[in-house]
Image (cartoon, grey):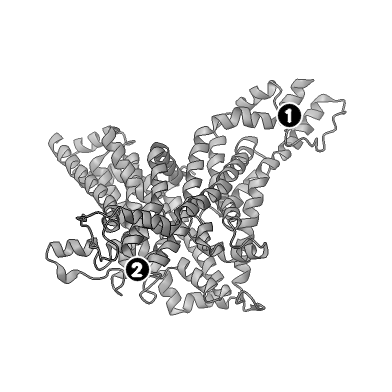
Amino acid sequence: MTPAFGSAPAGSGIASRPGGGNPDQPVRPHRKRRWGRTARWIGWLWVLPALIMYAFFVLRPLALTVQYSLYRWNGIGPARWVGFENYLTVFTDRDLLKIISNAFVLIVFFSFIPVALGLLVASLVRRITTGPGGTLVRTVLFLPQVIPLVAAGIAWSWVLSSSGLVNQALRAVGLDALTRSWLGEFNTALPAVGVIGTWVMLGLCTILLVTGMSKIDPSLYEAARMDGAGPIREFFAVTLPSLRQEIGVCLTVTIIAALASFDIVYISTSGGPGIQTTVPGLEIYRLAFSQRQVGLASALGVVLMLLVVLCVLPIQRLTRGEKA
Amino acid sequence: MNLSSRSERLTGRIFLIALVVVTLLPFLSMLSAALQPRGTVPTGLAWPSDPQWGNFVDAFTAANMGALLKSSMLIVAGVVPIGVLIATMAGFGLGHLRVPGGHIAFGLLLLGLTLPFEAVVTPMYYQMRDLGLLNTRWAIILPLIGLYMPFAVFWMRAHFINVPPELSEAARVDGSNTWQLFWRVHVPLARPAIASLTILLFLWTWNQFLLAIVMVDDATKRTMAGALGAFQGQWGTDLVLLCAGSLLILTPTLIVFLIFQRQFIKALLQGSVKG
C-alpha cells in the first residue's frame, strides 16, 4: 500500500537503507511505527555531512587546543607536560595581562561608542525614509561591513598617519600642536586603533537601531508626551526598553569583534608601539607562528574563547531573557 | 510640541549626514592619494592638479589582480556551494525532520557560534600540515566550511523550524520520499534564507584574513583580504601605489555589493540579529 509507505518519512533516495524495518512484516500498524522510528534515525544522514565537517575542522582543533595548552611544545620537537603552568603564565605575566586588558579597552571603541551614538541618531531620526535618499544612506553606512577589515586598516593607517587627513584637518583649524602620528605614539595608538573599530561598527549599529526604532508603536511616544515626559525621560521610558533586543544584538556582535580582533590591529600597527596595541588574537598568532610557543598560545586561545563566552552570555540573558 | 519634534528630526538628519560623510572620507582620502604622481608624498585630502589614473594600471600589474581574482573565486566556489548545501540539509534534519537526539547536535554546534578563529587556528595549522595541504587553497576552504557550520546550520534550522509539518505530510501522501520532498518542496520555500546565507558566506570567505595568512604563503593562492595584506607588506612604503592597489582590490566587492545592495543589507541585518 503506497500511502503507508508514503507516510513513513524514510528517504529512499539518499537514505535507501531499510534499516531495521522488515518490509515483509504482516501487521501493518506495527510495521508503520517501526518504520517511522527507523526513518527518524535515518534523518541523521541529513545532519551528518555538516556535523562531520564541524567535528573535524572545529571540535577536533578545539580539543587539541585544550591539549596543547597543557604542554610546552615548540611545534617540532617533543612536547613536555606542564599542567596548568601556561594558564598561570597567562594570568600572571604582565605583558599578557596588558594584552588582554587592551582587548577590553577596544570594547569601549568597538561597542559602547557605536551603540551610544547609534542610539542617539536612532532616537532623533526615528526612521530612515524608504525613498532613494534612505537607500543611499543605508548603502553608504553598510560599506564598512562589506569591505575586508584589512582594507579598513589600510585606509585608516593612511588617514591617521602624520600627513593624513586627521592631521590635515587639525592644521586647517590651527591646532598644529595636536598633530602627531596617531598610530605610532604610545598614548594615542590604542585609541586610534579603537577609532577604526568605531568606524567599522557605527553604521551597522545605527541601522540596526533605527530599524528597531521604526517598529516601536508611535502611540507610546504620544502617551509619554501627554504625561509630560521630556526627550530624556522619553528616551529612558520608551526608547531604551523597546530597543532592548536590538541593543543586545549590537553589543554581542561588536564585543565579539573587539575581543577577537586581529585584522585591523595586524594591518594598522602590528601590535606596536611596544605591545601598546597588541590584542590576544595577534599574540596567539605571534606566539604560535613566530615564537614557537604553541602551548602558551593555546592557553591564551582557551582563555580568549572563555572570555568571549563570559561577556556574551550575560548580554544574551539580559536582552533576550523572557523570549528564551 | 510638533515643532520640537521637527527640530529633533532636523538634528537627526544632520547627524545622519555627518555619519555618511565620515564613512566616505577614508575612501575619498585613499582615492586622492592614489591619484597623486608616484614618488610624491601626498597629503590627507587634496584633489591632484594632474590626476594620475595610470597608477591604477601600475597597481593592477603590481598586485597581480588577475591571479588574485581567480584565487578568491576558486576559494569561494569551494566554500559557498558545499557550505550552503550541507547546512541546508542539516537545518532540514534538525528543524523539520527533528531527528531523535538532535538537540545534542544542535548544542554542540552552538558551542562554536561565538568561537574566535584564533582559538583553533594553531592546531588547524598542524592538522593541515599533516594532511599535506599547507599552501594549497584546500587549507583555507576545508576549515572555513567547518567554521561556518554553527552559524549556517543555526540559520537554516531557524527557517525550517517554522515550516508547518502539514506541508510534508501533504507531499508524502503524493508518494514523494524525503529526498524528493527536500528538493521539490522545501528548498524552493527556503530560497530567501538560502540566498541570505549564500551572501553572508561569500562575504566572509572573500574577506577572510587570518586563515589566509596562516595557511598560505603565496599571495596569489589566498583570499582577497589575504592578498591585500600581502600587498600592504610589499608596497607599504609606496603610499600612492598602496592606495591605488587597495582601492582596486576593493572594487570587485563593491561592485557585487552595489548590484545586490538590497539583499546584502537584508542578509547582514538578519545575520547579526540571529547570530
User: Does label 2 lie on the same chain as label 1?
Assistant: no
Q: Is residue A52 visible?
A: yes
Relative vertical location of residue B17 with respect to residue A90 in this rendering, above or below: above
Residue occupying image coordinates x 67% and y 29%: B180
Residue B246 in sight in this render: no
Q: Is B80 left, or right, of B240 in this rendering?
A: right
Q: Position of residue A150 (x, y in %)?
A: 41, 59
Q: Which residue in the structure is indicated by mark 2? A: B237
Identify the residue at horizontal 49%, vertical 65% (top origin): A304
Q: Chain of mark 1?
A: A
Residue A317 position within the rendered picture, expressed as x and y whole percent measured from the top left: 45, 51
Residue mark closest to the camera, 1 vs 2: 2
Specify the quadrant of the image occupied by residue B183: top right
* Image-based side of B8 in relation to B131, left or right: left
Residue that label 1 marks: A8
Vertical arrangement, residue B197 with respect to residue A192, above or below: above
Residue A67 position by quadrant: bottom right
Query: Three-letter amino acid code at disc 1?
Result: Ala
Q: Label 2 neighbourhood size at 10 Å, few (<14), some (14-19), many (20+)?
A: few
Question: x%, y% of residue A133?
Answer: 26, 36
Q: Determine the secondary structure under disc 1.
A: loop
Which label belongs to residue B56? none
Evaluate if marks 1 and 2 touch, with contact meaning CB atoms under 8 Å apart. no
- Label total for image: 2
Q: Which chain letter goes with mark 2?
A: B
Q: Quarter of the image containing the N terminus of chain B?
A: top left
Could you tell me how far apart the alpha carbons at marks 1 and 2 are, in whole angstroms?
67 Å
Disc 1 crowd rating (10 Å Cα; few below 14, some 14-19, many 20+) is many
